[in-house]
Image (spheres, rainbow, N blue to C red):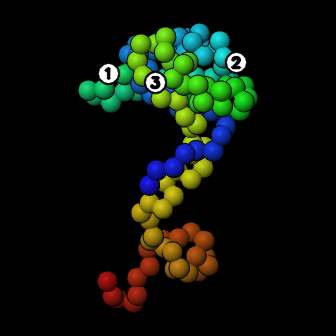
Amino acid sequence: MSYDAAPSDNLYMKGLPAGTNEESLKAIFGVYGTVVSTKVLPSPAGVSDAAALVRMSSVSEAQYLVENAVHVASGLGTPVQIKFASSGQNKGAGKGGGFGKGCKGKDGGKKGGFCMGKGKW
């Protein structure tokens, strides 16, 4: 399932030139507002471009970068995608798990765990 993250001051960028570092991100995107923090993400084997998280000082600064990504990145020489980063609050939601759900022991089901019937698998 694909969805866009809600607008925030935190941006996810991919397609950045290889060799991009935190200082170059601050220099490039600092022209468009105050860069609060940056993090260059590790590239998987065989991937020649870079990805990063960039936090701006306001949602409006971040919104400008998302809306004008084509123009902002034109000087970089590679097509860069800029979108709002997901907050991570729902990270892992809907994945696996299930053991212990609806299983209540002496603790009232608070610790979860694996439930089995008496002597049955």
Q: Nearer the viewer, mark 1 or mark 3?
A: 3
Residue 51 occupies quadrant = top left
The residue that label 1 is drawn on is 48
Indicate left or right for 87 with 80 as reference: right
Q: Residue at x 55, y 45 (%)?
A: 4
Q: Residue 80 has which mark?
A: 3
**Element marked by disc 1:** loop
- The span from disc 3 to disc 2 (Cα, nearest Å) is 18 Å
Does 103 sit above or below residue 12? Answer: below
Q: Residue at x 31, y 83 (%)?
A: 121
Q: Earlier in the sequence, mark 3 or mark 2?
A: 2
**Element marked by disc 3:** loop
Q: Earlier in the sequence, mark 1 or mark 2?
A: 2
**Element marked by disc 2:** loop
Q: Residue at x 46, y 13 (%)?
A: 76
Indicate left or right for 45 with 13 as reference: left
Does 10 sit above or below residue 90? Answer: above
Using a 10 Å C-alpha cutoff, classify the residue at mark 2 as few (fewer than 14 neighbours), some (14 to 19) or many (20 or more). Answer: some
Q: How many marks?
A: 3
Q: Look at the image and tell me in which quarter the N terminus lies.
A: bottom left
Q: Are marks 1 and 3 in contact (CB under 8 Å)?
A: no
Q: Amino acid at mark 2?
A: Gly
Q: Residue 37 at what x, y percent from top left?
A: 63, 23
Q: Residue 56 at what x, y percent from top left?
A: 67, 25
The residue that label 2 is drawn on is 33
Q: Is residue 55 at least partly visible in the picture?
A: no
Indicate left or right for 63 with 47 as reference: right
- The span from disc 1 to disc 3 (Cα, nearest Å) is 13 Å
